[in-house]
Image (cartoon, helix red, strand yellow):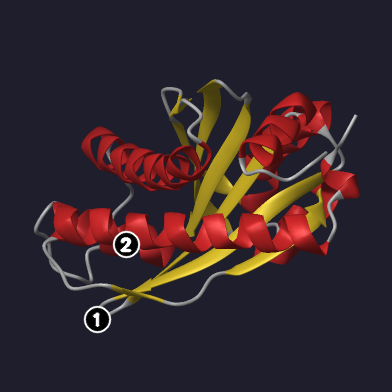
Amino acid sequence: MLSLNEVNEKYFDVLKEIGNIGAGNATTAIANMLGLRIDMSVPEVAFLPVEELGGAIGAEDEIIVGILLGVEEDIDGSMMFLMDMQSAHHIVNKLMMRPDDYSEPFDEMDLSAIKEVGNIIAGSYLSALSGLTNLTIAPSVPFVAVDMAAAILSVPAVQFGIFGDNALMINTEFSDDLGIKGHFILMPEEDSYAKILTALGIPV
């Protein structure tokens, strides 16, 4: 059975293109949500061992925001969107119409707004993947956490470990007057990965 460990250069390019399209969709959705003109840098895409995800994102003791969703319908798996605190405060302050330098701890309304942003970003990526494959793909209800990077990544590390040893990580930067940096991690289960490639016309 095919796994992410067997991904070759051809598959990597296909998934990178999906990441590009998904990031473009996410940029449009966030720009409409915030009422801003936002540009997006070309995302970096990498396959990493699950245990190396924390080191690739930053210091393990750095406080970050993580939004975890399940992937359902024709394919199954997990996905996570991670932001540093500066980016998360920037988005929330824009949505709540607060001063840019407001940095009090997030309340329930703030966390709800972050969850919605994560839902939009995840939905944009899944919509791109669904459009290219004609598969029905939907995100589950998102969970949001604000904690040290090591603590947040311990959750997907356990869940991703069920599906394989590697995860697809897409580093994306959305820019307006202040850059919004995010890390998008996707881990389809083995059966689902084969379905994606088959739907794209790639023999597995």
Q: In the picture, which quadrant includes the C terminus?
A: top right
Image location of residue 148, percent across then percent down: 61, 50
Q: Position of residue 186 (x, y in %)?
A: 63, 44
Image height of 111 relative to 70, above or below: below
- Hey, which quadrant is residue 59 in on the image? bottom right
Dot in front, 2 or 1: 2
From the image, tell me which residue sits under label 2: 27
Query: For the view shown, which residue lies furthest in the top direction?
Result: 73
Task: Judge left or right: residue 123 versus residue 192.
Answer: left
Q: State the residue at coordinates (64%, 55%).
A: 15
- Mark sitting on residue 177: 1
Q: Identity of the amino acid at label 1?
A: Asp
Instruction: Give residue 34's quadrant in the image.
Output: bottom left
Q: Residue at x 68, y 63 (%)?
A: 13
Task: Identify the disc placed on residue 154.
Answer: none
Mark 2 is on which residue type?
Thr
Helix, strand, or loop for circle 2? helix
Inspect this view and state whether residue 25 appears: yes
